[in-house]
Amino acid sequence: MGALMLQGTGSDVGKSVLVAGLCRALANRGLKVLPFKPQNMSNNAAVTADGGEIGRAQALQALACRVEPVVDMNPVLLKPQGDRSSQLVVHGKVRGTLSGGNYRAAKAALLQDVLASYQRLRARCDILLVEGAGSPAEINLRASDIANMGFARAASVPVLLVGDIDRGGVIAAIVGTRAVIDPEDAEMIRGFLINKFRGDPALFEDGYREIEHRSGWRGFGIVPWLAATARLPSEDAVALEHGLSQASGKRVVVACPVLPRISNFDDLDPLKLEPGIDLVMVPPGRPIPAEARLIILAGSKATIADLAALRSEGWDIDILAHHRRGGQILGLCGGYQMLGRTIADPHGLEGSPATVSGLALLDVDTVLTPGKHLERVRGEMLGAPVEGYEMHMGETTGPDTARPLGRFAGRIDGAASVDGRVAGCYLHGLFTRAEQRAVWLHRIGVDGSGRDYDASVSDALDEIAASLEQVVDVDGLIALSREAKSDT
């Protein structure tokens, strides 16, 4: 049938959630719908059915479509590993490391990769829903753009512009976008959505009509603040900046320090289902709560740099004190590597070749290696079923691996200290299944809720889809998608 692209007036306006919600709404109508994002920048990634990695948001959108995620859904993924460099992942595989300057030079070739993925997905579905990145109003980036108007123009895909009213200035954001972008780019935009509205939308009727008059674009609806969004996994660390939490004093505290290159922190989201748990994401400048019963070190895109940041915050002192008090500690992926005696980077994958001392809470050592291990796994951990995925560079060995946490199809993963209070593994998605989460909660004296996280996410998607059906002209969007050309 066609394709439709959602772009935003800025970052974090809710494009990912709207695409996911519309995917579920269209799927509920019996249409075959697929998600697509030409270029993503995120350290939250997922392993696909075809053995690559894509942004976590596109994996969520695939779930919304009730299909397995594949690498074509996010052909270009940038994973920041320093202030000025990112790992480049193309069609699910690492293609190298790029700085901002040489990435711009590489974009012309990458556009062809993007268009190839787009055409393959178009051939498989009734409607392809495309998510932009950042904003088309970033006109300083337009010349080499493949994420917004550069893609829309190349693929001839109509665009819907999303504005976030919650941050204020939505009239200026939408009308101002029209004012600054190239007229031919503006012609690609066929309408707009207002997102994150609180209160009675009738109060914004005059503003809505003013946007239509000044922009010349049709409004397709006003989307309310969707509470169910809080039950979806977050795409990137912007959500952490907006949602840092503190202990309430009424429940058992699980704490996770927020390191500069934290990745796949959505591993912790299932803990939010538990009424007996306060999940505290500890920001820089604050100590890890002394009352925490469990400290989790999440994944990292730059393990050695994040370990140095952990020490500069004094969190190593907090973690060692927690251990002396008998507390539990769990490391996931990069966090697992930090818990060992040493981390060696002989190939200079994260900077200059070096070997650094870890926290020495596990009797293991890690050597970072060039090849990235990507695998979806299912098996058993601590006597309970578990499933998830591995995504890491490096091999970890040592005496404590003789006490592995997981067993997957004839192999083992992870390590535990002699007393069992410190553990680590490479598995992402550890807490998704209720049976596995209950094992970890029992260790800190909490009964699990018994609810699978995936079921909770699917229910949230259905709630969002139902809300969008009420406030968005979905029929109009379907008609608009048919204006996309069938080839490029």
Image (spheres, rainbow, N blue to C red):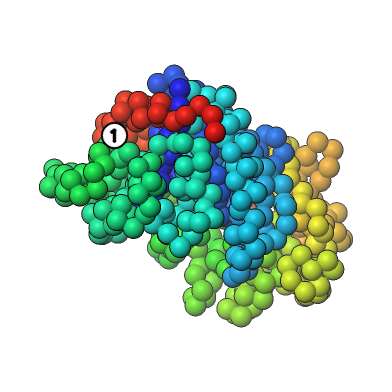
Query: What residue lies at 20% left-to-right and 49% top-to-bottom?
Result: 214
- Residue 401 on image: x %, y %: 83, 56
- Residue 166 on image: x %, y %: 28, 55
Side of 272 relative to 475 (left or right): right
- Quadrant occupied by the C terminus: top right
Q: Residues within 10 Å of mark 1 (few under 14, many from 20)?
A: some
- Residue 300 on image: x %, y %: 65, 61
Side of 35 relative to 464 (left or right): right
- Residue 434 on image: x %, y %: 57, 39
Foreground residue, 76 or 322? 76
Foreground residue, 423 or 339? 339
Q: Which residue position holds label 1?
A: 472
Residue farthest toward the top in the current orientation of the protein: 30
Query: What residue lies at 72% left-to-right and 51% top-to-bottom?
Result: 94
Question: How many labels sit on residues?
Answer: 1
Foreground residue, 325 or 359? 359
Residue kind at label 1, given as amino acid type: Val
Query: What residue lies at 29% left-to-right and 56% top-to-bottom?
Result: 179
Secondary structure state at the residue bearing disc 1 = loop
Res. 287 in view: yes
Above or below, 278 against 153 in this view is below
Query: What residue lies at 81% left-to-right and 36% top-to-bottom?
Result: 409
- Quadrant occupied by the N terminus: top left
